[in-house]
């Protein structure tokens, strides 16, 4: 409760009490020193001489508060961190005595000697060993001993093991020790306690990029967590499963994830569908497998997929020339089964318009060709035009498909009649298309075959994820946030094939002396926009501008309105949780016009 002024006045008395012979007073003085340092960090050096003998204490209470004090000083000052690294051997000895000591009723908790002190020492070792080879090497052996000798039947032991794992992962530990830590997390996944399973999945997700092969060994256990009843565990398991996908396991992992997509709650479907699309694009073993996988997603979760999934699949199909007959046949059969999934219906309509001649000719070699007539195909497309399930966009796809078939089918008179009917549609977009198509039949009939010929192969010049990204010269970058050492810059790109999507990349940097951990960037836009936040490159913003966290935002702006955004930033800095809100209204006009 003491103010900073009170802390300044009493710091000298607290420092004296740290040297008193009364162990109870020393314990309280150490805790008070922690508070003084938090309130007035510049008084830290006053307590430096008193810390010299604190780790020689026999009293566990004093030892515990001393470790808390040293931790606070190390977290707040790089100079203190460098100074206290020489204490690593002493901390290692204390920890070794704790795990090797016999039963002590005064300190025993569920058969473990003073777990609270062990956890505190492990946290301090983690800070001292980070980015330091010598300190890390000095603590490798004791960390291995703790990891192998700690009893796991009770939560007390699991708490110590979890801190040990975090320490191993944060310091420059040996590869064998990191494998041991990941195996501990793998055992946690089998624990009956859902909280332990959750922290294990979260920790594995943080380490999967650096220790990919070690985490892969627990793939089957991770996939089993997709069936967990707990929503948080299922989400973490889904994220980790996608992080484990590679060229070697793509078929097996996609089988499991597609099964999860079929049965999961609606809140998971959008993220799961997105993950499947990205993984399939990156690791697809063949074009047929890629097309089949995306069609399966559209069939089971079509209403949850992103806006760019339709043009992306169309591009994939267009470029897979040898698969045209197979794809149009599969999509035609899918339409006969279900027309409720609008993205699937849109892709199917487009394909039938492009490759309807292949459908009726029965040229499919990949599977048993179906026998279908021109009238049956037109019946299906006309059915889409009048269906209550069809959106205006879907009706546009269907009308265009029917028009394209005027150069591929012989039923031209029927097609003319359908097009002319929609020339008086109450849907302005559909009416405009019909009027233009009618003009093609009359005034520009000689140009119709050339205008409606098959689309050429679509070349990708540069890609970022599933959407082609085109660098646009003329959109300047901007600083969206700059406060307390955290700076957020925005850079801009345009997405093809939809120019209404602005692709914004955030670049987060940290100019302070301490890193910012648990960094989360969130954004919201007005209802006339649609926003999608992709995963960040990291959740730690390095200190002293030594690294950048990037994250991609896609904003759909169909009405070309001025872009406005509210951002929320949360992170942990020097042990304190920070949260801030900001409005961003100064977007360059080129980013939204």
Image (cartoon, grey):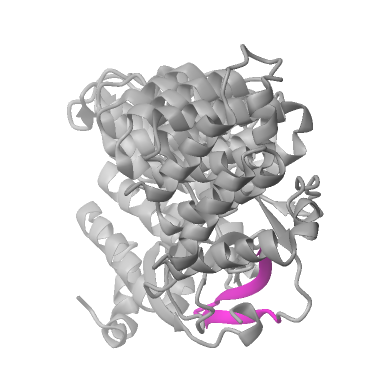
Q: Position of residue 287 (x, y in %)?
A: 71, 28
Give the main secondary structure of the magenta stretch: strand
Q: Residue at x 28, y 61 (%)?
A: 31
The boundaries of the magenta stretch are 476-495
> Quick check: 228 left or right of 484?
left
The quarter of the picture where residue 95 lies is top left
Q: Nearer the viewer, residue 278 or 570?
A: 278
Residue 106 in the image: above or below residue 103: below
Q: Residue at x 52, y 46 (%)?
A: 346
Q: Nearer the viewer, residue 565 or 562?
A: 562
Q: Position of residue 527 (x, y in %)?
A: 37, 72
Q: Nearer the viewer, residue 356 or 280?
A: 356
Q: Residue at x 43, y 53 (%)?
A: 53
Q: Quadrant of the N terminus?
A: bottom left
On the question of residue 535 being in view, the answer is: no
- Check if residue 330 falls in the magenta segment: no
The number of numbered badges drawn on the structure is: 0
The quarter of the picture where residue 508 lies is bottom right
Q: Position of residue 362 (x, y in %)?
A: 67, 19
Q: Nearer the viewer, residue 405 or 266?
A: 405
Residue 255 in the image: above or below residue 550: above
On the question of residue 495 being in view, the answer is: yes
Q: Quadrant of the C terminus?
A: bottom right
> Quick check: 307 left or right of 213?
left
Q: Residue at x 48, y 45 (%)?
A: 343
The quarter of the picture where residue 445 lies is bottom right
Q: Position of residue 43 (x, y in %)?
A: 43, 77
- Check if residue 482 falls in the magenta segment: yes
Residue 463 in the image: above or below residue 284: below
């Amino acid at each position: 409760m003491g103010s900073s002024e009170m802390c300044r006045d009493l710091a000298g008395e607290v420092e004296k009490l740290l040297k008193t012979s009364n162990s109870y007073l020393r314990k309280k003085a150490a805790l008070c020193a922690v508070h003084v340092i938090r309130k007035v960090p510049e008084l830290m050096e006053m307590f430096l001489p008193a810390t010299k003998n604190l780790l020689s204490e026999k009293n566990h209470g004093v030892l515990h508060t001393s470790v808390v004090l040293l931790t606070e000083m190390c977290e707040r000052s790089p100079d203190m961190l460098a100074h206290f690294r020489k204490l690593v051997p002493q901390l290692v000895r204390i920890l070794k005595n704790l795990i090797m000591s016999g039963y002590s009723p005064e300190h025993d908790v569920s058969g473990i000697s003073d777990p609270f002190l062990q956890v505190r020492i492990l946290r301090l070792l983690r800070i001292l060993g980070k980015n330091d080879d010598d300190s890390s090497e000095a603590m490798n052996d004791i960390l291995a001993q703790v990891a192998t000798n700690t009893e796991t039947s009770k939560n007390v032991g699991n708490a110590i093991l979890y801190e040990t794992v975090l320490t191993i992962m944060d310091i420059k530990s040996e590869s064998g020790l990191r494998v041991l830590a990941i195996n501990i997390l793998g055992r946690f996944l089998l624990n009956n306690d859902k909280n332990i399973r959750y922290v294990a999945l979260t920790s594995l997700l943080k380490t999967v990029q650096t220790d990919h092969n070690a985490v892969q060994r627990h793939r089957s256990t991770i996939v089993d967590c997709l069936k967990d009843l707990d929503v948080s565990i299922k989400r973490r398991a889904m994220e980790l499963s996608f992080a484990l996908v590679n060229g070697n396991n793509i078929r097996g992992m996609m089988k499991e994830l597609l099964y999860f997509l079929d049965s999961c709650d609606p809140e998971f479907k959008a993220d799961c569908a997105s993950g499947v699309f990205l993984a399939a694009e990156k690791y697809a073993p063949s074009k047929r497998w890629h097309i089949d996988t995306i069609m399966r997603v559209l069939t089971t979760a079509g209403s949850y997929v992103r806006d760019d999934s339709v043009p992306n699949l169309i591009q994939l199909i267009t470029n897979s020339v040898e698969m045209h007959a197979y794809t149009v046949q599969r999509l035609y059969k899918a339409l006969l089964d279900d027309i409720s999934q609008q993205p699937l219906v849109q892709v199917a309509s487009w394909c039938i318009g492009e490759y309807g001649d292949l459908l009726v000719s029965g040229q499919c070699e990949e599977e048993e060709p179906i026998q279908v007539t021109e009238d049956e195909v037109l019946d299906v497309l006309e059915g889409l035009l009048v269906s209550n399930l069809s959106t205006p966009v879907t009706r546009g796809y269907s009308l265009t498909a029917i028009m394209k078939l005027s150069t591929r089918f012989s039923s031209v008179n029927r097609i003319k009649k359908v097009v002319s009917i929609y020339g008086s549609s109450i849907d302005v977009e559909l009416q405009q298309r019909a009027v233009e198509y009618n003009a093609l039949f009359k005034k520009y009939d000689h140009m119709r075959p050339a205008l409606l010929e098959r689309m050429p192969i679509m070349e990708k010049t540069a890609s970022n994820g599933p959407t082609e990204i085109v660098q646009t010269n003329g959109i300047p970058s901007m600083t969206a946030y700059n406060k307390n050492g955290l700076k957020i810059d925005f850079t801009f790109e345009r997405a093809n094939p939809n120019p209404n999507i602005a692709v914004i990349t955030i670049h987060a940097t940290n100019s302070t002396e301490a890193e910012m951990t648990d960094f989360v960037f969130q954004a919201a836009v007005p209802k006339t926009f649609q926003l999608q936040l992709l995963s960040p490159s990291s959740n730690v913003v390095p200190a002293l501008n030594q690294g950048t966290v990037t994250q991609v935002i896609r904003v759909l702006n169909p009405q070309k309105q001025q872009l406005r955004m509210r951002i929320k930033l949360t992170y942990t800095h020097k042990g304190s949780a920070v949260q801030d809100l900001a409005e961003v209204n100064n977007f360059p006009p080129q980013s939204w016009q």
